[in-house]
Amino acid sequence: MSRIGKLPIKIPTGVNVEVNNNEIKVSGPKGSLSMQLLEGIDVKIDESNVIVSRRNDDAILKARHGLIRSLLNNLIIGVSEGFFKKLEVNGVGYKVNSTPTNLKLNVGFSHEVDYKIPEGITVSVEQNIITINGIDKQKVGQVAAEIRAIKKPEPYKGKGIKYVDERIIRKSGKSGKDK
């Protein structure tokens, strides 16, 4: 058995899970999400738990078993609590402004970079911290990665956009001495 796949998923209060043929719909206080089931994976709903099982012990189904359980767990957490990522902007003169649909970044280029915020994602800016919120874990992570890719942190002075908990390994520079 898959160690992850065999664990039941507890359904929090206020969250509704429906299984129709090969589609799972999850709705809660923050919104609703849906997902397609893979062939050979079954989902059963008991009282306040969701149980994911596979039809046989093929190697591919063993891998898919844990995958579907993790994705379903992310849907349930997303519609009940939501996900967020925090980015930090470091650099002299680097500024970030946000509107409901765009993020404007001044990060050392000759022009201001406009990033269009996708639907279902909210972005807020406080001083030099960008907070990305949403109910879809994959979309939140993708938006954070795209914003970070605009100006990756460099190893000499640490200027750029990085995750708040990310540690940048610094280099000493030309002289070779630690400064």
Image (cartoon, helix red, strand yellow):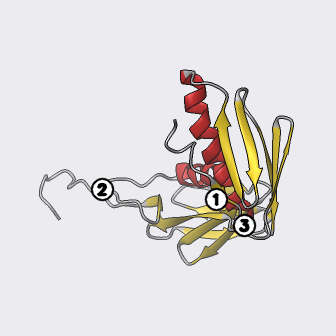
Real-space Cα distance between discs 2 and 1? 23 Å
Real-space Cα distance between discs 2 and 3? 41 Å
Q: Residue at x 78, y 64 (%)?
A: 15
The kind of residue on which mark 1 rests is Glu
Q: Residues within 10 Å of mark 2 (few under 14, many from 20)?
A: few
Closer to viewer: mark 3 or mark 1? 3
Closer to viewer: mark 2 or mark 3? 3
Residue identified by numbered label 3: 80
Residue 34, placed above or below residue 85: above
| Residue with the most extreme right position | 20
Q: How many labels does the image show?
A: 3
Q: What element carries label 2?
A: loop
Q: What element carries label 1?
A: loop
Residue 53, x across and y down, in percent: 65, 38
The kind of residue on which mark 3 rests is Ser
Real-space Cα distance between discs 3 and 1? 36 Å
Q: Name which of mark 3 and mark 1 comes first in the sequence.
A: 3
Residue 179, x across and y down, in percent: 17, 65
Q: Name which of mark 2 and mark 1 comes first in the sequence.
A: 1
Q: Which residue is drawn at 58% across and 23% down?
A: 60
Closer to viewer: mark 2 or mark 1? 2
Are the residues tagged 3 and 1 within 8 Å (C-beta)? no
Q: In which quarter of the image is residue 16?
A: bottom right
Q: What element carries label 3?
A: helix
